[in-house]
Image (cartoon, rainbow, N blue to C red):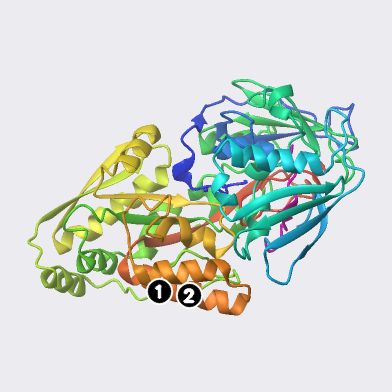
Amino acid sequence: MRTNRLLPLAAAAALVLSACGGGESVDTGGGGGGGGGDDVLVAAVSAEPDQFDPHVTNAYASFQVLENVYDTLVVPSAEDLTMQPSLAESWTTSPDGLTWTFTLRDGVTFHDGSEFDSADVVYSYRRIIDEELSNAYRFATVADVQAPDPRTVVITLTRPTPNLLELIGSFKGMAIVSENAAEEFDLQSEANGTGPFRLESSDANATTLTTFDDHWGGAPAIDGVEFRYIAEPSSALTALRNGEVQWTDNVPPQNVADLEDDEAVELGSVTSVEYFYLSMNYAVPPFDNRDVRRAIATALDRDEITQAARFGAAQPNQTAIPEGSPWYLDYAPFTPDEEAARQLLAQAGVQTPLTMGLMVTDEYPETVAAAQVIASELEPIGIQVEIQEEDFATWLDRQSQGDFDAFMLSWIGNIDPADFYENQHLSTGGSNYQGYSNPQVDDLLTRAATEPDQATRKGLYDEAARIIVDDVSYLYLYNPDEVQAWVPGLTGYQVRADAAIDFENVELP
Protein backbone atom coordinates (compact mmCIF):
# COMPACT_ATOMS: atom_id res chain seq x y z
CA MET A 1 0.00 0.00 0.00
CA ARG A 2 5.47 4.70 -2.13
CA THR A 3 4.69 7.05 2.36
CA ASN A 4 5.08 6.79 2.74
CA ARG A 5 4.21 4.35 -0.13
CA LEU A 6 2.90 2.02 2.53
CA LEU A 7 -0.23 0.97 0.75
CA PRO A 8 -0.73 -1.16 -2.31
CA LEU A 9 -0.84 0.89 -5.47
CA ALA A 10 -4.16 -0.78 -6.05
CA ALA A 11 -5.56 1.14 -3.09
CA ALA A 12 -4.59 4.55 -4.40
CA ALA A 13 -7.81 5.18 -6.29
CA ALA A 14 -7.95 8.85 -5.45
CA LEU A 15 -4.58 9.68 -6.91
CA VAL A 16 -4.84 12.53 -9.38
CA LEU A 17 -2.19 13.32 -11.95
CA SER A 18 -1.67 16.93 -12.94
CA ALA A 19 0.94 18.22 -15.37
CA CYS A 20 2.80 21.41 -14.70
CA GLY A 21 4.85 23.39 -17.13
CA GLY A 22 7.58 24.26 -14.70
CA GLY A 23 7.76 27.61 -12.92
CA GLU A 24 9.89 30.57 -12.09
CA SER A 25 13.44 30.17 -10.91
CA VAL A 26 13.81 30.09 -7.15
CA ASP A 27 16.39 31.28 -4.67
CA THR A 28 18.53 28.32 -3.70
CA GLY A 29 21.02 30.31 -1.72
CA GLY A 30 22.15 28.93 1.60
CA GLY A 31 21.83 30.49 5.01
CA GLY A 32 18.35 29.19 5.81
CA GLY A 33 17.00 28.72 9.25
CA GLY A 34 13.73 28.27 10.99
CA GLY A 35 11.17 30.41 9.21
CA GLY A 36 10.96 33.90 7.86
CA GLY A 37 13.22 33.55 4.82
CA ASP A 38 13.02 32.47 1.22
CA ASP A 39 15.33 29.44 1.46
CA VAL A 40 12.64 27.10 0.15
CA LEU A 41 13.19 23.67 -1.35
CA VAL A 42 11.19 23.25 -4.57
CA ALA A 43 10.42 19.58 -5.19
CA ALA A 44 8.94 18.16 -8.39
CA VAL A 45 6.50 15.31 -7.78
CA SER A 46 4.31 13.54 -10.30
CA ALA A 47 0.87 13.97 -8.79
CA GLU A 48 -1.38 16.30 -6.82
CA PRO A 49 -2.55 15.21 -3.35
CA ASP A 50 -6.19 14.18 -3.26
CA GLN A 51 -6.60 15.42 0.35
CA PHE A 52 -4.64 15.75 3.60
CA ASP A 53 -6.54 13.66 6.14
CA PRO A 54 -3.85 11.07 7.01
CA HIS A 55 -6.40 8.58 8.32
CA VAL A 56 -8.51 8.68 5.15
CA THR A 57 -6.32 9.24 2.11
CA ASN A 58 -4.73 6.30 0.28
CA ALA A 59 -2.84 8.43 -2.25
CA TYR A 60 0.94 8.37 -2.28
CA ALA A 61 0.93 11.96 -3.55
CA SER A 62 -0.71 12.99 -0.28
CA PHE A 63 1.72 11.00 1.85
CA GLN A 64 4.70 12.67 0.16
CA VAL A 65 3.47 15.86 1.82
CA LEU A 66 2.14 14.35 5.05
CA GLU A 67 5.47 12.65 5.78
CA ASN A 68 6.79 16.13 6.54
CA VAL A 69 3.75 17.41 8.45
CA TYR A 70 2.80 14.63 10.88
CA ASP A 71 4.56 12.23 13.24
CA THR A 72 3.80 8.70 14.39
CA LEU A 73 4.64 7.03 17.71
CA VAL A 74 7.55 5.22 16.09
CA VAL A 75 9.14 5.64 12.68
CA PRO A 76 11.27 3.54 10.27
CA SER A 77 14.93 4.48 10.22
CA ALA A 78 16.14 5.78 6.88
CA GLU A 79 19.04 3.32 6.85
CA ASP A 80 17.41 -0.10 7.35
CA LEU A 81 13.71 0.58 8.11
CA THR A 82 13.98 -0.73 11.67
CA MET A 83 11.48 1.00 13.94
CA GLN A 84 12.87 3.87 16.01
CA PRO A 85 11.43 6.28 18.63
CA SER A 86 9.45 9.29 17.44
CA LEU A 87 6.54 10.65 19.51
CA ALA A 88 7.09 7.66 21.79
CA GLU A 89 10.58 7.79 23.27
CA SER A 90 10.46 4.21 24.63
CA TRP A 91 8.18 1.19 25.05
CA THR A 92 7.93 -2.11 26.90
CA THR A 93 6.08 -5.35 26.21
CA SER A 94 4.53 -7.66 28.80
CA PRO A 95 5.89 -11.24 29.04
CA ASP A 96 2.76 -12.63 27.35
CA GLY A 97 3.08 -10.12 24.49
CA LEU A 98 -0.44 -8.77 25.04
CA THR A 99 0.30 -5.40 26.60
CA TRP A 100 2.50 -2.70 25.07
CA THR A 101 3.25 0.38 27.16
CA PHE A 102 4.57 3.50 25.40
CA THR A 103 6.25 6.41 27.19
CA LEU A 104 5.64 9.59 25.22
CA ARG A 105 8.12 12.32 24.43
CA ASP A 106 7.82 15.44 26.56
CA GLY A 107 7.83 19.00 25.22
CA VAL A 108 6.06 18.27 21.92
CA THR A 109 3.59 20.80 20.51
CA PHE A 110 1.19 20.76 17.60
CA HIS A 111 1.31 23.37 14.86
CA ASP A 112 -1.57 25.26 16.52
CA GLY A 113 0.47 25.55 19.73
CA SER A 114 -1.43 22.94 21.75
CA GLU A 115 0.55 20.44 23.81
CA PHE A 116 0.84 16.83 22.68
CA ASP A 117 -0.12 14.15 25.21
CA SER A 118 -1.59 10.66 25.48
CA ALA A 119 -5.16 11.84 24.83
CA ASP A 120 -4.12 12.75 21.27
CA VAL A 121 -2.86 9.21 20.66
CA VAL A 122 -6.03 7.62 22.03
CA TYR A 123 -8.17 9.98 19.93
CA SER A 124 -6.19 9.26 16.75
CA TYR A 125 -6.31 5.49 17.16
CA ARG A 126 -9.94 5.38 18.29
CA ARG A 127 -10.90 7.52 15.30
CA ILE A 128 -9.35 5.00 12.91
CA ILE A 129 -10.90 2.04 14.73
CA ASP A 130 -14.36 3.40 15.54
CA GLU A 131 -14.95 5.02 12.16
CA GLU A 132 -13.50 1.98 10.37
CA LEU A 133 -11.19 4.16 8.32
CA SER A 134 -8.83 2.81 5.69
CA ASN A 135 -6.17 1.59 8.14
CA ALA A 136 -8.49 0.04 10.71
CA TYR A 137 -7.21 -3.40 9.68
CA ARG A 138 -3.89 -2.49 11.29
CA PHE A 139 -5.68 -2.62 14.65
CA ALA A 140 -7.22 -6.05 14.05
CA THR A 141 -5.59 -7.44 17.21
CA VAL A 142 -6.04 -4.33 19.37
CA ALA A 143 -8.51 -4.82 22.22
CA ASP A 144 -8.08 -1.41 23.82
CA VAL A 145 -6.05 1.81 23.79
CA GLN A 146 -5.80 3.66 27.10
CA ALA A 147 -4.08 6.73 28.53
CA PRO A 148 -3.42 6.15 32.25
CA ASP A 149 -1.56 9.47 32.43
CA PRO A 150 -0.54 12.24 30.00
CA ARG A 151 2.82 10.65 29.16
CA THR A 152 1.72 7.00 28.87
CA VAL A 153 -0.27 5.01 26.32
CA VAL A 154 -1.15 1.34 26.87
CA ILE A 155 -2.23 -0.84 23.95
CA THR A 156 -3.85 -4.15 24.91
CA LEU A 157 -3.95 -6.93 22.31
CA THR A 158 -6.14 -9.97 21.78
CA ARG A 159 -3.10 -12.01 20.69
CA PRO A 160 0.64 -11.43 20.44
CA THR A 161 1.43 -9.13 17.54
CA PRO A 162 5.21 -9.03 17.00
CA ASN A 163 4.92 -6.50 14.16
CA LEU A 164 2.84 -3.98 16.15
CA LEU A 165 5.53 -1.29 15.76
CA GLU A 166 5.43 -1.61 11.97
CA LEU A 167 1.64 -1.54 12.03
CA ILE A 168 1.45 1.74 13.95
CA GLY A 169 4.56 3.47 12.63
CA SER A 170 5.44 2.40 9.13
CA PHE A 171 3.69 5.31 7.38
CA LYS A 172 1.82 8.51 8.04
CA GLY A 173 -1.59 6.91 7.60
CA MET A 174 -1.08 6.15 11.30
CA ALA A 175 -0.24 9.76 12.15
CA ILE A 176 -1.12 11.28 15.49
CA VAL A 177 -3.52 14.19 15.09
CA SER A 178 -4.59 16.51 17.89
CA GLU A 179 -7.54 15.52 20.06
CA ASN A 180 -10.85 16.36 18.34
CA ALA A 181 -8.95 17.42 15.19
CA ALA A 182 -11.70 16.17 12.89
CA GLU A 183 -14.17 18.48 14.62
CA GLU A 184 -11.86 21.49 14.90
CA PHE A 185 -10.23 21.37 11.45
CA ASP A 186 -11.20 20.49 7.91
CA LEU A 187 -8.62 17.71 7.69
CA GLN A 188 -9.15 17.26 3.98
CA SER A 189 -7.59 20.68 3.34
CA GLU A 190 -5.98 21.56 6.70
CA ALA A 191 -3.46 19.86 8.97
CA ASN A 192 -2.46 20.11 12.62
CA GLY A 193 0.54 17.90 13.11
CA THR A 194 3.70 17.80 15.19
CA GLY A 195 6.05 17.38 12.22
CA PRO A 196 8.88 19.66 11.08
CA PHE A 197 6.76 21.57 8.54
CA ARG A 198 3.29 23.16 8.58
CA LEU A 199 0.82 22.82 5.72
CA GLU A 200 0.52 26.39 4.42
CA SER A 201 -1.50 26.09 1.20
CA SER A 202 -2.37 23.78 -1.67
CA ASP A 203 -3.91 24.32 -5.10
CA ALA A 204 -3.87 22.81 -8.58
CA ASN A 205 -0.26 23.92 -9.14
CA ALA A 206 1.58 23.32 -5.88
CA THR A 207 1.45 22.47 -2.18
CA THR A 208 3.45 24.73 0.13
CA LEU A 209 4.87 23.90 3.56
CA THR A 210 6.56 26.30 5.98
CA THR A 211 9.06 25.45 8.69
CA PHE A 212 7.66 24.75 12.18
CA ASP A 213 10.07 26.59 14.47
CA ASP A 214 8.90 24.72 17.58
CA HIS A 215 9.40 21.21 16.21
CA TRP A 216 10.52 18.86 18.99
CA GLY A 217 13.48 17.71 16.90
CA GLY A 218 14.59 21.28 16.16
CA ALA A 219 13.60 23.56 13.30
CA PRO A 220 14.69 22.48 9.81
CA ALA A 221 17.48 24.48 8.17
CA ILE A 222 15.27 25.44 5.23
CA ASP A 223 12.31 27.80 5.41
CA GLY A 224 9.86 25.48 3.70
CA VAL A 225 9.05 23.11 0.87
CA GLU A 226 7.09 23.73 -2.31
CA PHE A 227 5.79 20.58 -4.01
CA ARG A 228 5.18 21.22 -7.71
CA TYR A 229 3.24 18.70 -9.78
CA ILE A 230 5.09 17.69 -12.94
CA ALA A 231 3.58 14.49 -14.28
CA GLU A 232 5.97 13.93 -17.18
CA PRO A 233 9.38 12.58 -15.99
CA SER A 234 11.33 14.26 -18.78
CA SER A 235 9.77 17.61 -17.86
CA ALA A 236 10.69 17.08 -14.20
CA LEU A 237 14.29 16.36 -15.18
CA THR A 238 14.40 19.45 -17.38
CA ALA A 239 13.07 21.56 -14.50
CA LEU A 240 15.83 20.17 -12.29
CA ARG A 241 18.51 20.98 -14.85
CA ASN A 242 17.12 24.48 -15.37
CA GLY A 243 17.13 25.30 -11.66
CA GLU A 244 13.34 25.55 -11.48
CA VAL A 245 13.30 22.75 -8.90
CA GLN A 246 15.99 21.35 -6.61
CA TRP A 247 14.73 17.80 -6.12
CA THR A 248 12.57 15.22 -7.87
CA ASP A 249 11.58 11.58 -7.54
CA ASN A 250 10.13 11.62 -11.06
CA VAL A 251 13.28 10.49 -12.87
CA PRO A 252 12.92 8.90 -16.33
CA PRO A 253 14.21 5.31 -15.98
CA GLN A 254 15.82 5.47 -19.41
CA ASN A 255 18.02 8.36 -18.22
CA VAL A 256 19.30 6.80 -15.01
CA ALA A 257 22.48 5.29 -16.48
CA ASP A 258 23.49 8.59 -18.13
CA LEU A 259 22.68 10.62 -15.03
CA GLU A 260 25.14 8.62 -12.95
CA ASP A 261 27.99 10.47 -14.70
CA ASP A 262 26.22 13.84 -15.00
CA GLU A 263 27.93 16.47 -12.84
CA ALA A 264 24.88 18.76 -13.11
CA VAL A 265 22.69 16.30 -11.19
CA GLU A 266 23.18 14.24 -8.05
CA LEU A 267 21.50 10.87 -8.20
CA GLY A 268 20.42 8.65 -5.34
CA SER A 269 19.16 5.09 -5.72
CA VAL A 270 18.27 2.12 -3.53
CA THR A 271 16.43 -1.12 -4.20
CA SER A 272 12.96 -0.50 -2.88
CA VAL A 273 10.64 -2.68 -0.85
CA GLU A 274 8.08 -2.28 -3.61
CA TYR A 275 7.47 -5.24 -5.89
CA PHE A 276 5.77 -5.66 -9.27
CA TYR A 277 3.84 -8.80 -10.01
CA LEU A 278 1.36 -10.47 -12.33
CA SER A 279 -1.61 -12.34 -10.91
CA MET A 280 -4.18 -14.60 -12.57
CA ASN A 281 -7.83 -15.07 -11.67
CA TYR A 282 -8.46 -18.41 -10.00
CA ALA A 283 -12.18 -18.11 -10.87
CA VAL A 284 -11.47 -18.04 -14.62
CA PRO A 285 -10.46 -21.36 -16.28
CA PRO A 286 -7.87 -22.41 -17.22
CA PHE A 287 -6.01 -20.00 -14.90
CA ASP A 288 -7.40 -21.94 -11.96
CA ASN A 289 -5.09 -24.76 -13.05
CA ARG A 290 -1.75 -24.69 -11.24
CA ASP A 291 0.12 -26.16 -14.22
CA VAL A 292 -1.17 -23.37 -16.49
CA ARG A 293 0.04 -20.72 -14.08
CA ARG A 294 3.39 -22.49 -13.73
CA ALA A 295 3.67 -22.73 -17.51
CA ILE A 296 3.29 -18.95 -17.76
CA ALA A 297 5.83 -18.45 -14.95
CA THR A 298 8.26 -20.75 -16.78
CA ALA A 299 7.89 -18.96 -20.11
CA LEU A 300 8.74 -15.50 -18.81
CA ASP A 301 12.21 -13.97 -18.72
CA ARG A 302 12.24 -11.56 -15.79
CA ASP A 303 15.52 -9.97 -16.89
CA GLU A 304 13.98 -8.93 -20.21
CA ILE A 305 10.79 -7.72 -18.56
CA THR A 306 12.79 -5.65 -16.08
CA GLN A 307 14.89 -4.12 -18.83
CA ALA A 308 11.83 -3.13 -20.84
CA ALA A 309 9.87 -1.76 -17.90
CA ARG A 310 12.66 -0.07 -15.94
CA PHE A 311 15.66 0.09 -18.28
CA GLY A 312 17.50 -2.06 -15.76
CA ALA A 313 16.68 0.17 -12.77
CA ALA A 314 15.24 -2.76 -10.84
CA GLN A 315 16.23 -6.15 -9.46
CA PRO A 316 14.49 -9.23 -10.92
CA ASN A 317 13.06 -11.35 -8.12
CA GLN A 318 10.88 -14.45 -7.93
CA THR A 319 9.71 -13.64 -4.40
CA ALA A 320 8.33 -10.40 -2.98
CA ILE A 321 11.04 -9.34 -0.53
CA PRO A 322 14.19 -7.75 -1.99
CA GLU A 323 17.71 -8.92 -1.37
CA GLY A 324 19.21 -6.91 1.46
CA SER A 325 16.17 -7.20 3.69
CA PRO A 326 16.63 -9.44 6.76
CA TRP A 327 13.47 -11.23 5.57
CA TYR A 328 14.82 -11.98 2.06
CA LEU A 329 14.45 -15.54 0.75
CA ASP A 330 16.76 -16.74 -2.02
CA TYR A 331 14.25 -18.82 -3.96
CA ALA A 332 13.96 -18.78 -7.76
CA PRO A 333 12.42 -22.03 -9.06
CA PHE A 334 11.50 -20.79 -12.54
CA THR A 335 14.02 -20.66 -15.37
CA PRO A 336 12.85 -19.38 -18.78
CA ASP A 337 12.19 -22.51 -20.85
CA GLU A 338 9.68 -22.56 -23.74
CA GLU A 339 9.65 -26.35 -24.09
CA ALA A 340 9.07 -26.91 -20.38
CA ALA A 341 6.25 -24.37 -20.49
CA ARG A 342 4.59 -26.18 -23.42
CA GLN A 343 4.83 -29.48 -21.53
CA LEU A 344 3.10 -27.96 -18.51
CA LEU A 345 0.27 -26.70 -20.72
CA ALA A 346 -0.08 -30.15 -22.28
CA GLN A 347 -0.03 -31.71 -18.83
CA ALA A 348 -2.88 -29.41 -17.87
CA GLY A 349 -4.89 -30.57 -20.89
CA VAL A 350 -5.07 -27.06 -22.31
CA GLN A 351 -5.65 -26.60 -26.01
CA THR A 352 -3.71 -23.80 -27.65
CA PRO A 353 -3.95 -21.13 -28.87
CA LEU A 354 -5.22 -19.82 -25.54
CA THR A 355 -6.21 -16.19 -25.03
CA MET A 356 -5.38 -14.32 -21.82
CA GLY A 357 -6.48 -10.77 -21.12
CA LEU A 358 -3.81 -8.84 -19.20
CA MET A 359 -5.13 -5.73 -17.46
CA VAL A 360 -2.68 -2.85 -16.98
CA THR A 361 -3.06 0.89 -16.44
CA ASP A 362 -1.69 3.73 -18.52
CA GLU A 363 -1.20 5.74 -15.32
CA TYR A 364 1.71 3.40 -14.53
CA PRO A 365 3.40 3.16 -17.95
CA GLU A 366 5.91 0.52 -16.89
CA THR A 367 3.03 -1.96 -16.58
CA VAL A 368 2.23 -1.36 -20.23
CA ALA A 369 5.87 -1.82 -21.29
CA ALA A 370 6.17 -5.00 -19.22
CA ALA A 371 2.92 -6.36 -20.66
CA GLN A 372 4.25 -5.99 -24.19
CA VAL A 373 7.26 -8.16 -23.35
CA ILE A 374 5.08 -10.67 -21.53
CA ALA A 375 2.86 -10.93 -24.61
CA SER A 376 5.84 -11.56 -26.88
CA GLU A 377 7.23 -14.25 -24.53
CA LEU A 378 3.93 -16.12 -24.14
CA GLU A 379 3.09 -16.18 -27.85
CA PRO A 380 5.62 -18.96 -28.68
CA ILE A 381 3.94 -21.33 -26.19
CA GLY A 382 0.50 -20.70 -27.69
CA ILE A 383 -0.87 -18.03 -25.38
CA GLN A 384 -2.21 -14.92 -27.08
CA VAL A 385 -2.13 -11.98 -24.67
CA GLU A 386 -4.70 -9.23 -25.09
CA ILE A 387 -3.26 -6.17 -23.36
CA GLN A 388 -6.15 -4.30 -21.76
CA GLU A 389 -4.96 -0.78 -21.01
CA GLU A 390 -7.33 0.98 -18.61
CA ASP A 391 -7.44 4.24 -16.72
CA PHE A 392 -6.71 3.56 -13.06
CA ALA A 393 -10.28 4.05 -11.82
CA THR A 394 -11.55 1.45 -14.31
CA TRP A 395 -8.63 -0.84 -13.45
CA LEU A 396 -9.54 -0.69 -9.76
CA ASP A 397 -13.21 -1.32 -10.43
CA ARG A 398 -12.49 -4.34 -12.63
CA GLN A 399 -10.09 -5.74 -10.05
CA SER A 400 -12.64 -5.44 -7.23
CA GLN A 401 -15.33 -7.03 -9.40
CA GLY A 402 -13.10 -9.95 -10.41
CA ASP A 403 -13.49 -8.88 -14.05
CA PHE A 404 -10.10 -10.01 -15.35
CA ASP A 405 -8.05 -12.97 -16.55
CA ALA A 406 -4.84 -11.46 -15.23
CA PHE A 407 -3.52 -8.11 -14.08
CA MET A 408 -0.20 -6.49 -13.32
CA LEU A 409 0.64 -3.84 -10.75
CA SER A 410 2.69 -3.42 -7.56
CA TRP A 411 2.63 -3.34 -3.78
CA ILE A 412 4.57 -0.54 -2.19
CA GLY A 413 6.24 0.47 1.05
CA ASN A 414 6.29 -2.95 2.67
CA ILE A 415 8.53 -3.48 5.72
CA ASP A 416 7.45 -6.51 7.77
CA PRO A 417 6.93 -9.87 5.98
CA ALA A 418 3.26 -9.72 6.95
CA ASP A 419 3.03 -6.63 4.70
CA PHE A 420 4.34 -8.64 1.76
CA TYR A 421 2.23 -11.78 2.12
CA GLU A 422 -0.67 -11.71 4.57
CA ASN A 423 -3.26 -9.42 3.00
CA GLN A 424 -2.51 -10.78 -0.46
CA HIS A 425 -2.40 -14.56 0.08
CA LEU A 426 -4.47 -15.48 3.12
CA SER A 427 -7.68 -17.02 1.83
CA THR A 428 -9.49 -14.28 3.79
CA GLY A 429 -7.03 -11.53 2.81
CA GLY A 430 -8.62 -8.22 1.94
CA SER A 431 -6.48 -7.83 -1.21
CA ASN A 432 -6.60 -11.46 -2.35
CA TYR A 433 -8.35 -10.47 -5.57
CA GLN A 434 -6.97 -13.50 -7.41
CA GLY A 435 -8.95 -15.85 -5.14
CA TYR A 436 -5.99 -17.88 -3.84
CA SER A 437 -6.75 -20.39 -1.09
CA ASN A 438 -4.25 -22.83 0.37
CA PRO A 439 -4.89 -24.14 3.91
CA GLN A 440 -1.18 -24.75 4.46
CA VAL A 441 -0.36 -21.13 3.58
CA ASP A 442 -3.20 -19.92 5.81
CA ASP A 443 -1.76 -21.93 8.69
CA LEU A 444 1.82 -20.73 8.15
CA LEU A 445 0.88 -17.05 7.82
CA THR A 446 -1.44 -17.20 10.82
CA ARG A 447 1.24 -18.81 12.99
CA ALA A 448 3.90 -16.39 11.78
CA ALA A 449 1.69 -13.43 12.71
CA THR A 450 1.92 -14.32 16.42
CA GLU A 451 5.41 -15.83 16.60
CA PRO A 452 7.66 -13.65 18.82
CA ASP A 453 10.99 -15.29 17.89
CA GLN A 454 12.31 -13.63 14.74
CA ALA A 455 14.25 -16.63 13.44
CA THR A 456 11.28 -18.96 13.88
CA ARG A 457 9.00 -16.34 12.34
CA LYS A 458 11.26 -15.99 9.31
CA GLY A 459 11.20 -19.76 8.84
CA LEU A 460 7.41 -19.74 8.76
CA TYR A 461 7.29 -16.91 6.23
CA ASP A 462 9.97 -18.57 4.10
CA GLU A 463 7.95 -21.78 3.97
CA ALA A 464 4.79 -19.88 3.08
CA ALA A 465 6.63 -17.87 0.40
CA ARG A 466 7.92 -21.02 -1.31
CA ILE A 467 4.38 -22.39 -1.57
CA ILE A 468 2.99 -19.06 -2.79
CA VAL A 469 5.67 -18.91 -5.49
CA ASP A 470 5.22 -22.57 -6.46
CA ASP A 471 1.44 -22.15 -6.69
CA VAL A 472 1.88 -18.85 -8.59
CA SER A 473 -0.59 -16.98 -6.44
CA TYR A 474 1.50 -14.01 -7.53
CA LEU A 475 3.97 -14.26 -10.37
CA TYR A 476 6.65 -11.99 -8.96
CA LEU A 477 8.70 -9.98 -11.46
CA TYR A 478 11.04 -7.42 -9.88
CA ASN A 479 11.78 -4.94 -7.09
CA PRO A 480 12.20 -1.50 -8.68
CA ASP A 481 14.97 0.84 -7.66
CA GLU A 482 13.83 3.98 -5.86
CA VAL A 483 15.63 6.65 -7.87
CA GLN A 484 15.65 10.34 -6.97
CA ALA A 485 17.72 13.31 -8.12
CA TRP A 486 18.66 16.71 -6.73
CA VAL A 487 20.93 19.67 -7.36
CA PRO A 488 24.61 19.34 -6.47
CA GLY A 489 25.37 20.66 -3.00
CA LEU A 490 22.01 19.76 -1.46
CA THR A 491 22.75 17.85 1.75
CA GLY A 492 20.87 16.06 4.51
CA TYR A 493 18.64 14.00 2.25
CA GLN A 494 18.60 10.20 2.01
CA VAL A 495 16.77 7.99 -0.48
CA ARG A 496 14.78 5.38 1.42
CA ALA A 497 13.75 1.88 0.43
CA ASP A 498 10.19 2.57 1.58
CA ALA A 499 10.02 5.69 -0.67
CA ALA A 500 9.19 7.99 2.24
CA ILE A 501 10.08 11.59 1.34
CA ASP A 502 11.59 13.27 4.40
CA PHE A 503 12.99 16.80 4.03
CA GLU A 504 13.52 17.51 7.74
CA ASN A 505 17.34 17.59 7.57
CA VAL A 506 17.82 19.07 4.12
CA GLU A 507 20.14 22.03 3.55
CA LEU A 508 20.29 23.84 0.23
CA PRO A 509 23.57 24.84 -1.42
User: Percent from the top left, x then y, of residue 408?
Assistant: 36, 50
Which residue matches tag 1?
Answer: 466
Determine contact: label 2, label 1, CB under 8 Å.
Answer: yes
Using a 10 Å C-alpha cutoff, classify the residue at mark 2 as few (fewer than 14 neighbours), some (14 to 19) or many (20 or more): many
**Which secondary structure type mostly characterizes the magenta part of the structure?**
loop
Cα distance between the residues tagged 2 and 1: 6 Å
**Could you tell me which secondary element the residue under label 1 belongs to?**
helix
Residue 462's mark? Answer: 2
Looking at the rendering, the stretch of residues picked out in magenta corresponds to 69-80
**Amino acid type at mark 2:** Asp
Indicate which disc residue 10 carries. Answer: none
Q: Residues within 10 Å of mark 1 (few under 14, many from 20)?
A: some
Q: Is 162 on the left-hand or right-hand side of 332?
A: right
**Relative to residue 474, is residue 423 drawn left or right?**
right
Task: Decide which of 63, 168 is in the foreground and name it.
Answer: 168
Q: Is residue 314 visible?
A: no
